[in-house]
Image (spheres, rainbow, N blue to C red):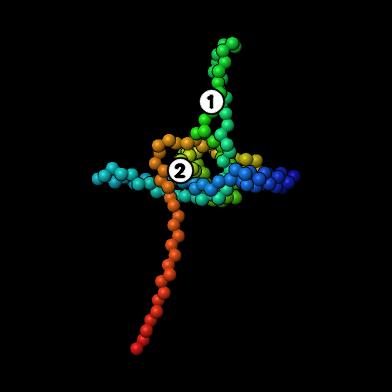
Protein backbone atom coordinates (compact mmCIF):
# COMPACT_ATOMS: atom_id res chain seq x y z
CA UNK A 1 0.00 0.00 0.00
CA UNK A 2 2.80 2.43 0.89
CA UNK A 3 4.57 1.85 -2.42
CA UNK A 4 1.37 2.61 -4.32
CA UNK A 5 0.85 5.86 -2.39
CA UNK A 6 4.48 6.88 -2.85
CA UNK A 7 4.17 6.26 -6.59
CA UNK A 8 1.02 8.40 -6.65
CA UNK A 9 2.79 11.26 -4.84
CA UNK A 10 5.79 11.02 -7.20
CA UNK A 11 3.45 11.23 -10.20
CA UNK A 12 1.86 14.40 -8.77
CA UNK A 13 5.32 15.88 -8.09
CA UNK A 14 6.34 15.17 -11.67
CA UNK A 15 3.22 16.92 -12.99
CA UNK A 16 3.83 19.93 -10.73
CA UNK A 17 7.47 20.10 -11.83
CA UNK A 18 6.33 20.38 -15.45
CA UNK A 19 3.90 23.20 -14.68
CA UNK A 20 5.60 25.15 -11.90
CA UNK A 21 9.22 23.94 -12.00
CA UNK A 22 12.00 26.51 -11.92
CA UNK A 23 15.76 26.20 -11.62
CA UNK A 24 17.00 27.51 -8.27
CA UNK A 25 20.25 27.28 -6.36
CA UNK A 26 20.01 26.70 -2.63
CA UNK A 27 22.64 28.55 -0.59
CA UNK A 28 23.80 27.60 2.89
CA UNK A 29 26.13 29.97 4.73
CA UNK A 30 28.43 27.73 6.74
CA UNK A 31 31.00 30.21 7.98
CA UNK A 32 31.82 33.88 7.80
CA UNK A 33 35.23 35.48 8.09
CA UNK A 34 35.83 39.10 9.04
CA UNK A 35 38.62 41.30 7.74
CA UNK A 36 39.56 43.41 10.77
CA UNK A 37 41.23 46.12 8.67
CA UNK A 38 38.39 46.80 6.24
CA UNK A 39 35.45 45.43 8.25
CA UNK A 40 34.32 43.37 5.27
CA UNK A 41 32.66 40.04 5.94
CA UNK A 42 33.28 37.16 3.57
CA UNK A 43 30.83 34.24 3.84
CA UNK A 44 31.64 30.62 3.04
CA UNK A 45 28.68 29.26 1.09
CA UNK A 46 27.71 25.74 0.06
CA UNK A 47 25.34 25.57 -2.88
CA UNK A 48 23.03 22.95 -4.36
CA UNK A 49 21.48 23.47 -7.80
CA UNK A 50 17.92 22.17 -8.15
CA UNK A 51 16.67 21.91 -11.71
CA UNK A 52 12.94 21.75 -10.98
CA UNK A 53 11.85 23.33 -7.70
CA UNK A 54 8.07 23.74 -7.60
CA UNK A 55 7.37 27.39 -6.79
CA UNK A 56 3.66 27.79 -6.25
CA UNK A 57 1.90 31.03 -7.16
CA UNK A 58 1.28 33.62 -4.46
CA UNK A 59 -1.96 33.08 -2.58
CA UNK A 60 -4.16 35.37 -0.59
CA UNK A 61 -3.50 35.28 3.13
CA UNK A 62 -6.66 35.78 5.16
CA UNK A 63 -6.26 37.36 8.56
CA UNK A 64 -9.16 38.39 10.72
CA UNK A 65 -8.55 40.33 13.87
CA UNK A 66 -10.85 40.11 16.88
CA UNK A 67 -13.35 42.75 15.85
CA UNK A 68 -17.03 43.27 16.49
CA UNK A 69 -19.33 41.17 14.32
CA UNK A 70 -20.43 44.13 12.23
CA UNK A 71 -16.84 45.23 11.42
CA UNK A 72 -14.61 42.63 9.85
CA UNK A 73 -11.67 43.25 7.61
CA UNK A 74 -8.79 41.25 6.40
CA UNK A 75 -7.24 39.74 3.40
CA UNK A 76 -3.64 40.44 2.64
CA UNK A 77 -2.23 39.76 -0.79
CA UNK A 78 1.52 39.48 -0.75
CA UNK A 79 3.86 38.15 -3.37
CA UNK A 80 6.72 38.15 -0.86
CA UNK A 81 5.54 34.88 0.73
CA UNK A 82 5.58 31.67 -1.30
CA UNK A 83 5.33 27.92 -0.91
CA UNK A 84 8.06 25.83 -2.53
CA UNK A 85 8.07 22.06 -2.95
CA UNK A 86 11.39 20.32 -3.47
CA UNK A 87 11.58 16.65 -4.36
CA UNK A 88 13.79 14.75 -1.93
CA UNK A 89 15.51 12.99 -4.83
CA UNK A 90 16.66 16.38 -6.15
CA UNK A 91 18.35 17.28 -2.87
CA UNK A 92 19.91 13.92 -1.89
CA UNK A 93 22.32 14.56 1.02
CA UNK A 94 22.02 18.39 1.09
CA UNK A 95 20.25 19.23 4.34
CA UNK A 96 17.86 22.17 4.04
CA UNK A 97 17.63 24.31 7.17
CA UNK A 98 15.81 27.44 8.26
CA UNK A 99 17.81 30.54 7.25
CA UNK A 100 19.08 28.90 4.06
CA UNK A 101 18.12 30.86 0.98
CA UNK A 102 17.86 30.63 -2.77
CA UNK A 103 17.98 33.09 -5.63
CA UNK A 104 15.03 33.21 -8.02
CA UNK A 105 14.18 36.04 -10.44
CA UNK A 106 17.22 37.97 -9.14
CA UNK A 107 15.66 38.13 -5.67
CA UNK A 108 16.71 36.45 -2.45
CA UNK A 109 14.16 34.11 -0.87
CA UNK A 110 14.80 33.12 2.76
CA UNK A 111 13.54 29.77 4.08
CA UNK A 112 11.36 30.44 7.12
CA UNK A 113 9.65 27.06 7.63
CA UNK A 114 10.32 23.48 6.52
CA UNK A 115 7.83 20.61 6.48
CA UNK A 116 8.07 17.11 5.08
CA UNK A 117 5.47 15.55 2.79
CA UNK A 118 4.00 12.11 3.32
CA UNK A 119 6.53 9.27 3.40
CA UNK A 120 9.30 11.89 3.16
CA UNK A 121 8.95 12.15 -0.60
CA UNK A 122 9.46 15.92 -0.69
CA UNK A 123 9.97 19.04 1.40
CA UNK A 124 7.55 21.95 1.54
CA UNK A 125 9.25 25.24 2.27
CA UNK A 126 7.69 28.51 3.27
CA UNK A 127 9.95 31.21 1.88
CA UNK A 128 9.91 34.97 2.20
CA UNK A 129 11.42 37.46 -0.22
CA UNK A 130 14.12 39.58 1.42
CA UNK A 131 14.24 43.12 0.01
CA UNK A 132 17.65 44.74 -0.28
CA UNK A 133 19.66 41.75 0.95
CA UNK A 134 23.07 40.90 -0.44
CA UNK A 135 22.52 38.07 -2.92
CA UNK A 136 25.91 36.31 -2.65
CA UNK A 137 25.14 34.61 -5.94
CA UNK A 138 27.45 31.77 -6.86
CA UNK A 139 27.72 31.25 -10.59
CA UNK A 140 29.15 28.17 -12.21
CA UNK A 141 31.57 28.89 -15.04
CA UNK A 142 32.84 26.28 -17.46
CA UNK A 143 36.02 27.01 -19.38
CA UNK A 144 37.16 25.33 -22.54
CA UNK A 145 40.55 25.56 -24.10
CA UNK A 146 41.67 24.92 -27.66
CA UNK A 147 45.38 24.84 -26.85
CA UNK A 148 47.39 22.32 -28.83
CA UNK A 149 50.84 21.25 -27.71
CA UNK A 150 53.52 20.11 -30.11
CA UNK A 151 57.13 19.18 -29.71
CA UNK A 152 59.97 19.14 -32.22
CA UNK A 153 63.20 17.26 -31.80
CA UNK A 154 66.16 18.08 -34.00
Q: Between marks 1 and 2, how big is the CA–CA gap?
A: 24 Å
Depicted 146 relative to depicted 33: above or below: below
- Between 4 and 151, which is closer to the camera in this rendering? 151
- Residue 58 image position (x, y, % from top left): 56, 34
The residue furthest left is: 37
The residue furthest right is: 1
Q: Residue at x 56, y 23 (%)?
A: 75
State the SS at label 1: strand
Neighbor class of circle 1 (other Cα within 10 Å; few <14, some 14-19, many 20+) is few
Q: Quadrant of residue 82?
A: top right
Q: Which mark is residue 106?
A: 2
Q: Which mark is residue 76?
A: 1
Q: Please state the total of marks drawn on the protein image.
A: 2
Q: Residue at x 44, y 36 (%)?
A: 130
Disc nearer the start of the sequence (1/2): 1
Locate the N terminus and report the quarter of the image it occupies. Answer: top right
Amino acid sequence: MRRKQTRFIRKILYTLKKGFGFTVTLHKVTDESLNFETGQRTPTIITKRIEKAIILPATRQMKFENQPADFKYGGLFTTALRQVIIDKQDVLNFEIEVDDYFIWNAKRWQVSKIDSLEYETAFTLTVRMVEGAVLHMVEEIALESQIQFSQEVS
